[in-house]
Image (cartoon, grey):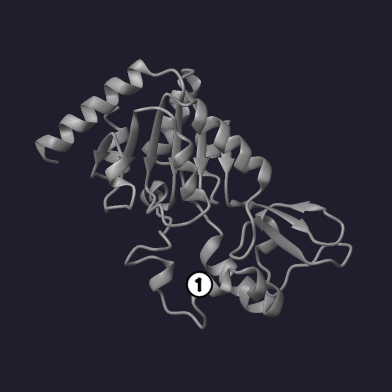
């Protein structure tokens, strides 16, 4: 790690100490250090061979037209088995317990923030840990997919679907509104592990009214020029130092 990056991490540490209303906005890069693949990285799901492109498979229209293929992909690629929270998840949960962090806004669907102990987690894209019957609304955990194949069905006969936001579907208005409010009230907004290309989620940053916008990423984003502090490093390396 170069001297400039080390200096920026020290600045972030100071900002965290001085802040009382921190919000963290994170993407797939938060969970890659827990062994969960990033959809858009070179080795991620978007670059693996499959019968259809992943972005097509996890769309609403594909789910309705070819549910068998959707669930085959879903079982293989999106259900997380054995992943544990990493240093970033754990440090964020610690900051919440200290009363400094007010919300985690995540694009991830793996539930690792909650597993680490975070309580106010706003899941923009839902969670693979929750599933529900399209007919009667009965809820299920991931056990519904264990040792089974094909389309899962409820005891009432209805199709069970994951509580995740598919392509072509809108975000939950309540989660979106709570995210906007949290960002508006933040005195420090830390954005990490996201390419900031998925909208409307990425558009939430424009609601930040402060002057301490921190971007932590290994690659460039379209928002880099707007950052008050830019740190090019792995999230784990940063959060293990702050």
- Local packing at callout 1 (Cα closer than 10 Å; few below 14, some 14-19, many 20+) is some
Give x and y (percent) for residue 121.
56, 36
Q: Where does residue 7 sit, x and y in percent of width and height? A: 16, 30
| Residue 36 seen anywhere in this rendered image of the structure | yes
Question: Farthest residue toward the left?
Answer: 3
Considering every residue shown, the one lying at the far right of the view is 156
Q: Which residue is drawn at 51% across and 25% down?
A: 185
Q: Tell me the quarter of the picture where residue 40 sits.
A: bottom left
Which quarter of the image is occupied by the C terminus? top left
| Quadrant position of the N terminus in the picture | top left
- Left or right of 37? Residue 105 is right
Judging depth in this view, the residue of 215 and 208 nearest the camera is: 208
The image shows a total of numbered marks equal to 1
Tell me if residue 117 can be seen: no
Task: Give the quadrant of residue 57.
Answer: bottom right
Residue at 39% from the left image edge and 65% from the top image edge: 44
Question: Residue 147 location, x and y as percent?
Answer: 66, 67
Q: From what the image shows, is residue 109 above or below residue 13? A: below
Q: In this view, does 203 lie to the left or right of 18?
A: right
Q: Mark 1 points at which residue?
A: 54
Q: For this view, does 31 lie left or right of residue 160?
A: left
Against 45, is 10 above or below?
above
As drawn, 215 above or below 55: above
Q: Which residue is drawn at 83% across and 54% down?
A: 137
The x, y position of residue 111, in whole percent, is 55, 45
| Farthest bottom residue in view | 51
Q: In this view, does 18 lie above or below 90?
A: above
Q: Is mark 1 on a helix, strand or loop?
A: helix
Q: Which residue is drawn at the image coordinates 55% and 36% (left, top)?
A: 180
């Amino acid at each position: 790690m170069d001297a400039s990056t080390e200096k920026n991490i020290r600045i972030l540490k100071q900002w965290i100490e001085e802040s009382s209303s921190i919000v963290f906005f994170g993407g797939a890069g938060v969970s890659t250090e827990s062994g969960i693949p990033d959809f858009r990285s070179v080795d991620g799901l978007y670059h693996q061979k499959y019968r259809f492109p992943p972005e097509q498979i996890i769309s609403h229209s594909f789910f309705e037209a070819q549910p068998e293929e959707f669930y085959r992909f879903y079982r293989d690629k999106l259900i997380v088995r054995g992943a544990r929270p990493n240093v970033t998840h754990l440090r964020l949960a610690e900051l919440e317990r200290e009363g400094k962090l007010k919300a985690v806004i995540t694009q991830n669907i793996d539930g690792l923030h909650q597993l680490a102990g975070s309580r106010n987690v706003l899941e923009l894209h839902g969670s693979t840990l929750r599933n529900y019957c399209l007919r009667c609304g009965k809820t299920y955990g991931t056990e519904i997919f264990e040792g089974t194949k094909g389309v899962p069905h409820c005891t009432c006969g209805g199709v069970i679907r994951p509580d995740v936001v598919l392509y072509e579907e809108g975000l939950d208005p309540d989660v979106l509104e709570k995210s906007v409010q949290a960002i508006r009230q933040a005195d420090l907004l830390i954005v990490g592990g996201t390419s900031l290309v998925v909208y409307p989620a990425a558009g939430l940053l424009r609601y930040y009214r402060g002057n301490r916008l921190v971007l932590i990423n290994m690659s460039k984003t379209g928002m880099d020029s707007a950052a008050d502090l830019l740190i090019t490093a792995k999230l784990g390396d940063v959060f293990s130092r702050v």
